[in-house]
Amino acid sequence: MFKRNIVIFISIFLIIEISGVLDKDIVVFGNTLDKVQIQPVGEKVGTIHSNSSLQSTGYINQLITRASQLDRVEEEMEMFYFVPMNEKGTNNYIEIHYTHSSLLIPTLSTLTVYIDDEPQESVFLTEETSDGGKLRIPLQEENLTPGYHKITLNKYSVISDNICTDQNSPANWVKLLPSSFIFIDTKSSVMIEQGLSEYPFPFAEEGIYSEDYSVILLPDNPSASILSAAVQINSYLSLKGSGEQHITIMTESEWWKSKEEIKHVVAIGSIDSWSTEMKGLLPYEDVNNNEFILKMFTINKAQEKEKKELLFVLAKNDHVIAENMHILTDDMAVNQLTGNELVIQTPMLNKSNKKEEQKYSFEDYGYPSIIVDEIKQNSNSLFFNLPTWMLRDEESFLLLKVKFSQMLLEHLDEDDLKQEWLNGFTIYLNGIPKTFALTNVIKEENKDELEIKIPLIEFNLQEQNTRTVEVSFESNIRDVDNACNNDNKTGRWIMIENSSYFDGEFNMNASNSFHFFPGPFMNEFGFKKTAVIVPENIDGHFLTQLAAVTNMFYKTTQNTLIQLNNIPLILKEPLSEEQQEELENYHIIMLGEINRYGLFKDRVQDFLVQYESSMWKLNQFNIINEATNFVSWIQPSVWNKERSMIIFQGKEIEADKVVDEVLLMHLQNNLSDGQMLALSANGNISTIYFNNDSTLHETENNLKDTEEKMNNRIPYEIYIFIFSLIVIVFILYMYLRNRRKIDGK
């Protein structure tokens, strides 16, 4: 008995000691071989695993993707590099590779490098460097702050020491090579103190192209409100990243069973919707109905030291999460987040920042005002991803707001008016030039600013099959004196202000084809009266594909004015009678085979694509059934022919994959027509046209008009009868006439 009591005492003692060693806030899940530790964050997050450390430490990136040539006496070009959040060592540098003409005067020709407009180093362009020069510049602490930095290369070169020689010769050139690169001595970790202050990092990080480092976690059997929140934050994080991969969505059961490595996690769900184990992590018992909670945790496998972040997005009820999700997707709200735990008791109103009139300004795309002069004659290219309706509309235009320096205008005195065409600038849209002189400025006294309205139809953008418009500018400024004046710094410049903008009238016509896609499902501010119908039984794989589709919609019109808060309405089966009645007011997005939805049980015959023996019937559209893997088409809604419906389907009815990335990228980057897109097994995409009028309901109306016309016209049989009668009479007449001649003889 005594021995037994001793054993019990020692056992209790050991248990107490061991429990004291383990942090009481650490919750361990999983089996003994692959345990997962989740720990709440205190005052600081600590060291977490970075996003840019893939297989080894060190971050290397090309500065330019193709060779760039500088041809004038003095010319410069700009490049940009990205610094990730990682902790960094001391071996950080950029390396510039270049070649140049062997005819340059080495004692007068130089190459100077600036970083963020601060000079770093200058070198002579000598005979030794003409076949290949290399310039390595160490990066200082101020050059390594996270985010983007600018590199400026200034080239000054001459081919003669005679001041009166025209130095702008084809022999005066320097070429920057694509082998130029930046190396940042990144480590595999990053130190974070306040996780919410750094959000959306590490769940999304601009400049890191391996985007598959986060997962969105939902409770099993998520409600429509949680699905809506998941789609919204998925789109936000995807747009904030730089890659094309989509962030995975998983349910809790799928997450625990997953064999993949642990990733950063955003967990979204009401407190009571999680499993007992997950709920045990959450120190929230008495939560008010309107409270919205953000709580940071760290997560790692038991045998790993480096941790990932886990952000819980919580509330007492699912609808409160959906109503407050804009706090994590609106930049104004995101910039106010702080700490590692935030309980919001007074929700921020979800007010859109949209303007009454939508204008796509240079500033909205993040571009500063542009200055071109005698030294920097060519600007960098600006890229704008414009909505389809703007590119298709004949009334769309670009309004340029241009300022000119007074010194440029003062050189144009009355005697020079006949030569004013020598000064001005050229704009290039997708490589097509258009030049403007200073004539209009000269005619108005003291006028140093000009607004120029340029119709986009002049640049044939509709025929170029792309939503991306590349814009660049070139100054056209004549020499003040003569070749013997080598001073180009005369204060003469032209500035294109970043308040310049694209504009046009939003067009919702041809709604049952891809002609104005993503209209009518989206307008210039985001989704408009669009609903996504989701079947009752879904998994994370289906939700990830749904998020990929909604992300594609956003990316077709990607700019800072599109409101991520204007998300589509998510409707999960079964729908109430009231919800079904409302469907006639919405455009519809649906994924997968029709029979998967109970809602369409009595409407299967209304869909363009029909099935027979588990195989779709595409042959009627001149498509080979067996050679096609995915299709997408637009048709009138089965509830209201004045609304539209877009469907994405995969080849096999029971297959999990219903949409393919190749098809989504085609819709995102190309202008399409027709009503159906078919992706074959060989990767080719076919466009199918059902009629010339682009819309089904218009075709039906045309058919009705044709039928009415046919009903009002005289039947063709009557014409045949009359013609036959005339022929018979004519033959009879000729017979009688010939008979009379015979009788007369």
Image (spheres, rainbow, N blue to C red):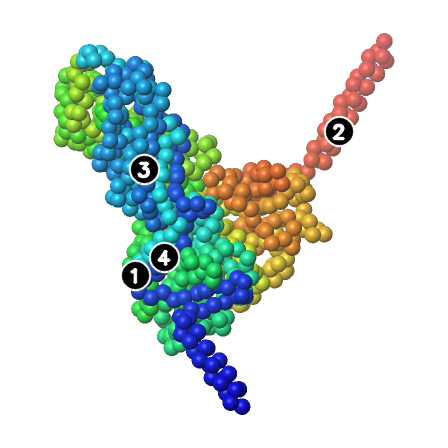
Q: Tell me residue 617's x, y (percent).
A: 67, 46
Give the class, few, some or many, for how many residues have Cα within 10 Å of label 3's Cα (few <14, many ≥20).
some
Q: Tell me residue 442's x, y (percent).
A: 18, 26
- Name the secondary structure under disc 1: loop
Amino acid tagged 4 = Thr
Lower sequence index among marks 3 and 2: 3
Q: CA distance from mark 3 to mark 2?
A: 95 Å
The quadrant where residue 467 appears: top left
Task: Name above or below for residue 168 compared with residue 439.
Answer: above
Amino acid tagged 3 = Tyr
User: Which residue bears the numbered disc 2?
Assistant: 724
Lower sequence index among marks 2 and 4: 4
Tag nearer the camera, 4 or 1: 4
Task: Name above or below for residue 194 compared with residue 12.
Answer: above
Q: In which quadrant of the rendered image does the N terminus lie?
A: bottom right
Tag nearer the camera, 1 or 3: 3
Lower sequence index among marks 1 and 3: 3
Q: In which quadrant of the rendered image does the C terminus lie?
A: top right
User: Which residue bears the numbered disc 4?
Assistant: 47
Q: Nearer the viewer, residue 393 or 631?
A: 631
Q: Tell me residue 54's x, y (percent).
A: 45, 47
Lower sequence index among marks 4 and 1: 4
Residue occupying the far bottom of the picture: 1
Q: Which residue is painted at 25% across and 38% down in the image?
A: 116
Q: Which numbered circle lies on residue 507? A: none
Q: Which numbered circle lies on residue 93? A: 3
User: Which residue bears the numbered disc 1?
Assistant: 338
Task: Name above or below for residue 574 compared with residue 657.
Answer: below
| Residue 580 can be seen in this image | no
Q: CA distance from mark 1 to mark 3?
A: 33 Å
